[in-house]
Image (tube, rainbow, N blue to C red):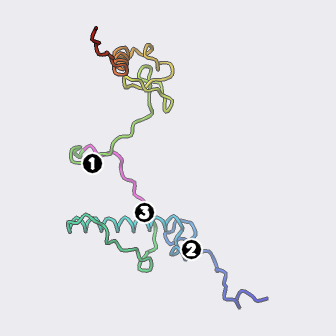
Amino acid sequence: MESHDEMGCQAPERPILCINNCGFFGRAETMNMCSKCYKDMLLKQEQAKLAASSIGSIVNGSSSVIDMEPVNMGAVDVKGGPVERKILPTEPSSGSSSSTSFQMPRKEGPGRCTTCQKRVGLTGFNCKCGNLFCAIHRYSDKHDCPFDYRTTARDFIAKSNPVVKSEKLDKI
């Protein structure tokens, strides 16, 4: 039998660590990066490419992005070094004016019963008055609902059952 040296196959001498020093092992196919760092690098390239094309379209006045070029993986220079992560504050500082800064819409918390303030989450009941209620207060008589069910029902019946009058017959 032939040995590995005769066939040209060589086992790697030792595992290669990721060039971003994240602690995971890298591969030659992913430019000596781990899969996470490689995906992050590809994502940053795509974002930079989109930003450059959008800036170019704004400057040139065109709104189409048809002439995009594919990313050339051979021309990418990746420098090894520690990856720094910065945590940005989620709330704007009190010194900045709220009218000039962009504020993200706040995510509403879990739903609560309007009557007893009990957390209902996905099991809450929406009433026709527009409020959310728990299982105990879901009925209109339990939460003093201001919605007028009687008038709504009358209008519905009147619309669905129009008055039918026959033509008068001439008497002989």
Quadrant location, the N terminus = bottom right
Left/right placement of residue 23 relative to residue 75 reads right
| Distance from Cα at disc 3 to Cα at disc 1 | 26 Å
- Name the disc covering residue 102, or none: 1
In the image, the segment drawn in magenta is 85-94
Left/right placement of residue 146 relative to residue 31 reads left
How many C-alpha atoms fall within 10 Å of the one at disc 2: few (<14), some, or many (≥20)? some
Residue at left offset 66%, top offset 84%: 10
Q: Earlier in the sequence, mark 3 or mark 2?
A: 2
Disc 2 residue type?
Arg
Report the residue marked by disc 2.
Answer: 27
Residue at left offset 34%, top offset 15%: 151
Residue 63, position in %: x, y? 25, 63
Query: Mark 3 or mark 1, which is nearer to you?
Result: 1
- Tag 2 secondary structure: loop
Q: Residue furthest front?
A: 172
- Prevailing secondary structure class for the magenta stretch in the rendered image: loop
Residue 12 falls in image quadrant: bottom right
Disc 1 residue type?
Phe
Residue at left offset 56%, top offset 71%: 26
Report the residue marked by disc 3.
Answer: 84
Residue 56, position in %: x, y? 25, 68
| Distance from Cα at disc 1 to Cα at disc 2 | 41 Å
